[in-house]
Amino acid sequence: MSSYILTQLNIVIIQACILLIFGIEIFKIHNRGSLLLVLIVLFLQGLCGMSLGFMLSTTCSGEIESIMLATFILFPCFAISGILWPKLGMSIFLQKLSLGLPHTLAAESMRWIMLRGKDITWVTVWPGFLSTIAWASVFIILSMIVMRFKQS
């Protein structure tokens, strides 16, 4: 399992770098903050997504089942987290619900870093890092638990 994670992490690093280069150099997205912090947020989000995919692949019995479950999980997460739809346009219930999703706080952190130039000590930036690390850890731990049950 660790070899799979390490291999995938290399791909995540490459994807995060390409995304950052395209966003800033080609699409001219303004960045007032630290590129290293932005890269770390992107890397952590990639790790979280990879961990979710690994958890789904260990819990589901087939490929089609995994794809359907991933679609069922990811689309609402993106829609409610404020990435595709502004959180201010949602009901109070959905705004509160979105705070528990893996992408919401990380997207806020990215906005505060890139648009306002804040660093990791800012009160709205560091929760995005902690939330993403916590979600990735939960997904990896659940994957290991499921793998142990399937082996026995």
Image (cartoon, rainbow, N blue to C red):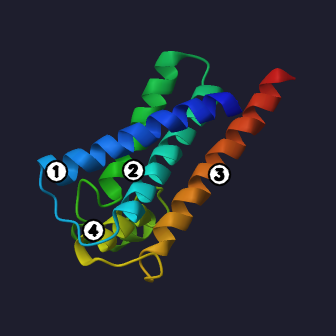
**Mark 4 is on which residue type?**
Met
Q: Which residue is mark 3?
A: 137
Check disc 1 and report its element: helix, strand or loop. Answer: helix
Figure check: 113 above or below 67: below
Q: Amino acid at mark 3?
A: Ser
Sequence-first tag of 3 and 4:
4
Question: Which of 106 and 66 lies nearest the eye of the viewer?
Answer: 106
What amino acid does circle 1 point to? Glu
| Mark 2 or 4, closer to the camera | 4
In the rendered structure, find residue 114 and report the number of the disc placed on it. 4
The label number, if any, that marks residue 25 in the structure image: 1
The residue tagged 2 is: 77
| Front of the two marks 3 and 2 | 3
Are there few (<14), some (14-19), or many (20+) residues within 10 Å of tag 4?
Answer: some
Helix, strand or loop for disc 3 = helix
Q: CA distance from mark 3 to mark 2?
A: 18 Å
Which residue is at 50% across, 22% downward?
65
Q: Nearer the viewer, mark 3 or mark 4?
A: 4
Q: Residues within 10 Å of mark 1 (few under 14, many from 20)?
A: few
